[in-house]
Image: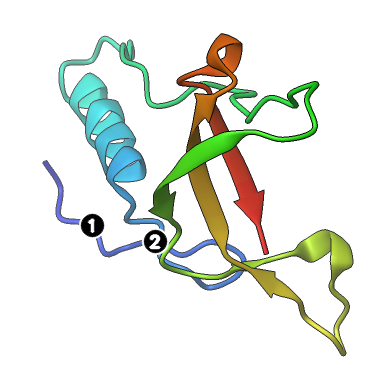
Amino acid sequence: MRNMAPQRNVLGETTDKPDIVRLRQMVESSQDDHTGVVEGVIGKVGHVAPLLRCKQVQAVCTSVDPKPRLLKRWSSKENQRYALYFSFQVVEPSEHEGVELMMHC
């Protein structure tokens, strides 16, 4: 495998996340064996938290994003807004038990 310096996106953040590194390795190995075929799942497109049709749920927080994310939709050049993302797993009501939800603040 080639030794590559971490790449940066348009915001200047490094793109050395585990999935990106794995994808880069898969692409490079396919170039090395000259097949050009890359097989593997690195994520699911459109995987978003569902909207539940109930007024209240009991849920357990399973993770908190360690780095605040820029909210581009509500930011301007003069006023940039950031949020922390929280992931939850529903406990009650039982018909939604185990469903993963997301919240930001």
- Measured as percent of width and height from the top left, residue 63 is found at 39, 50
- Amino acid carrying mark 2 in the image: Gln
What's the residue at 76%, 76% (across, down)? Answer: 81
Residue furthest left as drawn: 1
Q: Are marks 1 and 2 in contact (CB under 8 Å)?
A: yes
User: Which image quadrant for residue 83?
Assistant: bottom right
Position of 6 with respect to 32 (left or right) is right
- Measured as percent of width and height from the top left, residue 50 is found at 68, 25
Mark 2 lies on a secondary structure that is loop
How many marks do you count on the picture?
2
Nearer to me, 21 or 49 = 49
What's the residue at 52%, 22% (across, down)? Answer: 99
Residue furthest bottom as drawn: 78
Query: Where is mark 1, residue-wise?
Result: 4
Position of 68 with respect to 41 (left or right) is right
Q: Which mark is residue 7?
A: 2
How packed is label 2: few (under 14 Cα within 10 Å), some, or many (20 or more)? few
What's the residue at 38%, 26% (across, down)? Answer: 42
8 w.r.t. 102: above or below: below
How far is the residue under mark 1 from the one under mark 2?
8 Å
Nearer to me, 96 or 36 = 96
- Amino acid carrying mark 1 in the image: Met
Position of 13 with respect to 26 (left or right) is right
How packed is label 1: few (under 14 Cα within 10 Å), some, or many (20 or more)? few
Mark 1 lies on a secondary structure that is loop
Position of 39 with respect to 88 (left or right) is left
